[in-house]
Amino acid sequence: MTSLITKKSIHVNLLTQTHGEFRVFCFKNGLSMQEVVEGLVSRLIEGDPRLIKMVERLKVERNDKSIRKLLDTDTDSIYAELEKSDKTH
């Protein structure tokens, strides 16, 4: 008896440059973008230690970016307050 294979689609947004380079990478390797994503995700959920490590690194990088963004926002606020102060004096 054959099992019915069903698929679920996902939608992701990539930077234009990232998308283009990914497309070229896949083409050069004779694979579709779908095949590469399916292969990576399958290995990730199977617990591939290299991919798990990569996800952990991405989490750290995201948190660093969030901290930097927060600090940049604080810096912008401080400069805005200084400018207001300069205009009133």
Image (cartoon, grey):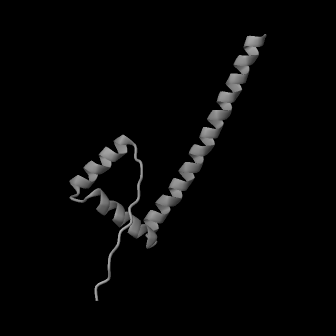
Q: Does residue 26 appear left or right of residue 41 in this picture?
A: left
Number of numbered discs on residues: 0
Quadrant of residue 78 within the rendered picture:
top right
Name the residue: 30% across, 56% down: 33
Q: Residue furthest right?
A: 89
58 versus 49 height, above or below: above
Name the residue: 56% across, 53% down: 60
Q: Quadrant of the C terminus?
A: top right
Q: Does residue 10 appear left or right of residue 29 in this picture?
A: right
Q: Nearer the viewer, residue 61 or 89?
A: 89
Image coords of residue 6 (percent x, y): 35, 72
74 versus 45 height, above or below: above
Q: Nearer the viewer, residue 3 or 29?
A: 3
Image coords of residue 72 (percent x, y): 62, 34
Image coords of residue 80 (percent x, y): 68, 23
Name the residue: 23% across, 57% down: 29
Image coords of residue 79 (percent x, y): 68, 24
Q: Quadrant of the N terminus?
A: bottom left
Quadrant of residue 84 within the rendered picture:
top right
38 versus 26 height, above or below: below
Q: Does residue 5 appear left or right of residue 61 in this picture?
A: left
Name the residue: 72% across, 20% down: 82
